[in-house]
Image (cartoon, coloured by chain):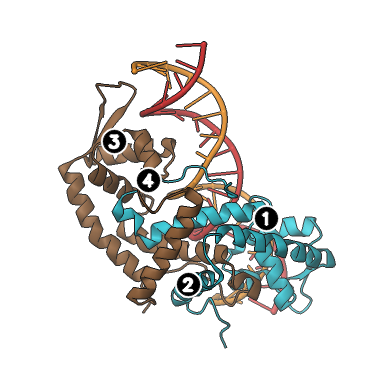
Chain colours: A cyan, B brown, C orange, D red
Amino acid sequence: MREIEVGTPPVNPPERVRRLASWLLNQARVIGNRSTAAAFGPGNRTDYAVLAALQEFGPSSQAAIGLRLGIDRSDLVALLNRLGAAELVRRAPDPSDRRRNTVTITTAGRDHLEAMDAAVDHAQDQLLAPLDPAERATLVALLQRVVAHHHGGGDAPRP
Amino acid sequence: MREIEVGTPPVNPPERVRRLASWLLNQARVIGNRSTAAAFGPGNRTDYAVLAALQEFGPSSQAAIGLRLGIDRSDLVALLNRLGAAELVRRAPDPSDRRRNTVTITTAGRDHLEAMDAAVDHAQDQLLAPLDPAERATLVALLQRVVAHHHGGGDAPRP
DNA sequence: CCCATTTCAGCTATACTGATATGA
DNA sequence: CTCATATCAGTAGAGCTGAAATGG
């Protein structure tokens, strides 16, 4: 029994394509999106990242959240509208700089984040099912290095 | 000097997010898409896969191409319209089954494919820049196993 | 004046769904 | 009548751009 359903999977692609890291990343990402779409609702896969950032770093402006997670300022507006409507975050004008909204995670938001943690772990488990723990760590480490190289330090805190 | 330009890179994301394979795959895929978008024109990253499939397996129906590469039947129509307009493929009704179009790569298509090969290699090189050859092979092999597991054999020919 | 922040309106490319016409 | 094939129309989310409104 296969846990993740795939819509239009490739069947025997040509050599040239089968060895391309960029192609494999695209395929793997579609699979990962499906497994995480089951954990969160569809469409809202970035909610987890935003709540996790607010939990780990405390109240932040929208610009700070976007910068931290690589989410566009525009997309954050609708996302925070949803999280705010669900009472998972509060959005209040910053008294010290009234251009800013200070976004704060609520108690309900913390609960929701913890509930999602289990679902997220399960999604990663499904995605990486064919790999043993050491191989999973290797894959994650290699991907972190690729991302860090191009983003200039996305995998480790910078001074 | 960084070769690949990135629009909204994450800066110091939270622990919970930084270790997620699904998140890393998304980040790496955006980087890979940018590097390949430089090799092909933007928008047409699947052209290479289609031409490679026709080169390796010979003339095929559109349904066969889509099945092989995991491309939706609908999206193939516009793609082949473009490739046909550029004279890189020929599309002729199959005399033995007139529902089908037999798609054949042209000489110009072969030339174009070979020209793209170099650009594609360069794009992979940029994407995997921080990894040595052994690490690149490891990453590709791990991704192939993940993809194969969920697609049921996407990384190796099946009988 | 210039710059930062939020918000909105819209654009493009991707992955997909559903319906239709034609033919095996 | 059924199934397969190709085509078209249209949907939904992701990533992004440009401009307006407000304020430092």
Crowd tier of the residue under label 3, counting other residues whose Cα lies within 10 Å: few below 14, some 14–19, many 20 or above: some
Q: Position of residue B38 (x, y in %)?
A: 33, 61
Residue at horizontal 70 percent and vertical 78 percent from the top: A57
CB within 8 Å, label 3 to label 4: no
As shown in the figure, which amino acid type bears the numbered disc 3?
Answer: Ser
**Vertical position of residue B69 compared to residue A80: above or below:** above
Residue B60 disc label: 3
Report the mark closest to the observer, 1 or 4. Answer: 4
Numbered disc 2: secondary structure? helix
B98 on left or right of A145: left
Which residue position is annotated with label 1? A39
As shown in the figure, which amino acid type bears the numbered disc 4?
Answer: Arg
Residue at horizontal 77 percent and vertical 70 percent from the top: A104
Which residue position is annotated with label 2? A147
CB within 8 Å, label 3 to label 2: no
Circles 3 and 2 on the same subunit: no
Crowd tier of the residue under label 2, counting other residues whose Cα lies within 10 Å: few below 14, some 14–19, many 20 or above: many
As shown in the figure, which amino acid type bears the numbered disc 2?
Answer: Val
Report the mark closest to the observer, 3 or 2. Answer: 3
Please tell me which of labels 3 and 4 falls first in the chain: 3
How far is disc 2 from disc 1 in space, using C-alphas?
24 Å
Which of these two is toward me, B119 or A101? B119
Numbered disc 3: secondary structure? loop
Residue at horizontal 30 percent and vertical 21 percent from the top: B98
Q: Position of residue A58 (x, y in %)?
A: 74, 77
Circles 1 and 3 on the same subunit: no
Which of these two is toward me, A88 or C12? A88
